[in-house]
């Protein structure tokens, strides 16, 4: 639901940079032609430096919370205590610099109960210590900072193996039997109140705001599995500059297609051949695609003159239905958001209590899962492909695509037409050369006549007129 053509400066991260840093990049490195490779490298280095500085600031506040001296040394027990508190605050998505000691203590009480994967995260501490502070018995502030920086580099992968895998399992278990990549909202909340899916607490308003609901059938709203997992529903705010989110497998699928196609566009046959040979977690290789899905891809190609641009909304939409568990559904720009502002957070109830979820489950009809869409006949009205397909394009680089179309059109002109244009150009050049030669002859004749009529005065003017040669 966000814009396909980013309008924010500095490659979309300008809002996260300090004003002075953003000004430097906008003034000296940004241009109409975009960023050079060197400019992107400088931006990455700047963000890395800012991330490191943020760790130092947060660690300094953590030391203060525990009455530790940043200029002194810590033994193993005290260092572990500092690291644990630092990580707990990060995993809760809190800003330790903005909290009192009492607020931090209250927030981290019974943390292992609130965060079931705490033991797995703690396992990163000795691993990081072995890599950057091996053999140390006394730890300086910088030693602790290096350990935390190494943990931060690996925390995302550890959360992927624990929290993300568990959520994915719960959603697939609750999915409708016909493999649409959707979970009825009733079953979504039932997984939380009757099962062990403690993560599923988002309110309906929040799910709708973030583009995670399929409401094509208003009587039976559904959670879109890929949108829920990969569009920041359960991300952890690890930093002002990044979040820990579930890895999006659609990015790997797109990379394989791009490597196979080696161009920003392809024909439907080329795409289908690669998709059939590209397996995913939920789709085997050498499968068959439903005829309706093939026709949709052909419709996209017809919309673009016979080829499909890979980096636009219509192809992303097609990829969602080809890989419903891996690729998110792309809502139209402006209809949903990928984040919640502070103003919206004040008005929008982000989560539901257990009693609110239970009330929804009990008041919703328990329709048998077998009723509904048959993916072998996805053109029936109850299928997402029919109900949610919106034939409206939004391109990442519309200007670039128009230039590509123009070059393809020129290349597609018949050879005889190009030869005809070439001959016509040559004839025009010959015509102008002939005119120039005639004009030169006329001027010389006129000068000659003038010289014969003025007698001895001819020498100097002739020399002066000699520079006027056509």
Image (cartoon, rainbow, N blue to C red):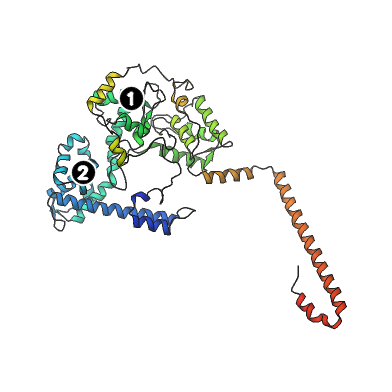
Whether tag 1 and tag 2 are in contact, CB under 8 A, the answer is no
Q: What element carries label 2?
A: helix
Q: Nearer the viewer, residue 466 or 132?
A: 466
Q: How crowded is mark 1: few (under 14 residues within 10 Å), some or many (20 or more)?
A: many
Q: Where is residue 162 in the image (x, y as percent from the top left)?
A: 27, 35
Depth check, front residue: 128 or 110: 110
Which residue is located at x 40 percent, y 24 percent?
179
Residue at 21% over, 43% down: 89
Circle 2 is placed at which residue position? 89
* Label 1 – label 2 distance at C-alpha: 31 Å
Q: What element carries label 1?
A: helix
Residue at the spot of label 1: 185
Quadrant in which residue 347 is drawn: top left
Residue 244 in view, yes or no: no
**Where residue 391 sits in the image (x, y, percent)?**
50, 31
Q: Residues within 10 Å of mark 2 (few under 14, many from 20)?
A: many
Q: Which sits earlier in the primary sequence, circle 1 or circle 2?
A: 2
Q: Where is residue 167 in the image (x, y as percent from the top left)?
A: 30, 31
The N terminus: image quadrant: top left
């Amino acid at each position: 639901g966000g814009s396909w053509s980013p309008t924010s400066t500095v490659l979309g991260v300008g809002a996260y940079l300090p004003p002075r840093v953003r000004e430097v990049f906008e003034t000296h490195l940004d241009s109409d032609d975009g960023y050079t490779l060197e400019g992107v490298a400088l931006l990455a280095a700047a963000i890395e430096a800012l991330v490191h500085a943020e760790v130092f600031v947060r660690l300094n506040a953590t030391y203060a919370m525990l009455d530790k001296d940043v200029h002194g040394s810590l033994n193993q027990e005290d260092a572990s205590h500092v690291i644990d508190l630092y990580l707990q605050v990060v995993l809760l998505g809190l800003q330790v610099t903005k909290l009192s000691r009492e607020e931090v203590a209250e927030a981290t009480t019974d943390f292992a109960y609130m965060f079931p994967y705490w033991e797995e995260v703690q396992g990163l501490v000795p691993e990081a210590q072995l890599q950057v502070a091996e053999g140390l018995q006394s730890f300086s502030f910088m030693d602790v900072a290096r350990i935390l920086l190494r943990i931060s580099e690996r925390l995302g992968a550890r959360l992927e193996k624990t929290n993300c895998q568990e959520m994915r399992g719960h959603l697939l278990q609750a999915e409708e039997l016909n493999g649409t990549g959707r979970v009825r909202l009733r079953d979504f909340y039932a997984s939380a109140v009757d099962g062990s899916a403690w993560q599923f607490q988002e309110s309906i308003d929040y799910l709708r705001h973030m583009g995670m609901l399929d409401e094509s059938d208003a009587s039976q709203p559904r959670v879109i599995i890929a949108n829920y997992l990969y569009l920041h529903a359960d991300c952890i705010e690890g930093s002002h500059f990044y979040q820990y989110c579930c890895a999006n497998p659609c990015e790997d699928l797109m990379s394989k297609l791009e490597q196979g196609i080696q161009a920003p566009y392809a024909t439907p046959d080329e795409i289908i051949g690669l998709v059939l040979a590209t397996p995913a977690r939920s789709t085997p290789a050498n499968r068959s695609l439903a005829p309706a899905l093939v026709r949709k891809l052909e419709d996209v190609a017809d919309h673009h003159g016979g080829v499909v641009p890979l980096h636009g909304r219509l192809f992303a939409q097609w990829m969602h239905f080809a890989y419903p568990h891996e690729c998110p559904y792309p809502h139209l720009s402006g209809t949903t958001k990928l984040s919640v502002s502070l103003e919206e957070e004040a008005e929008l109830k982000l989560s539901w209590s257990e009693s609110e979820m239970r009330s929804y489950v009990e008041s919703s009809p328990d329709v048998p899962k077998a009723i509904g869409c048959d993916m072998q006949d996805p053109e029936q009205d109850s299928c997402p492909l029919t109900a949610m397909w919106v034939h409206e394009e939004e391109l990442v680089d519309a200007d670039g695509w128009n230039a590509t179309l123009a070059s393809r059109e020129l290349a597609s002109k018949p050879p005889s037409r190009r030869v005809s244009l070439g001959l016509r150009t040559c004839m025009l050049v010959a015509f102008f050369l002939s005119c120039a030669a005639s004009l030169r002859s006329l001027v010389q004749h006129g000068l000659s006549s003038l010289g014969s009529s003025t007698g001895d005065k001819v020498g100097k003017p002739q020399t002066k007129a000699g520079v006027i040669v056509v």
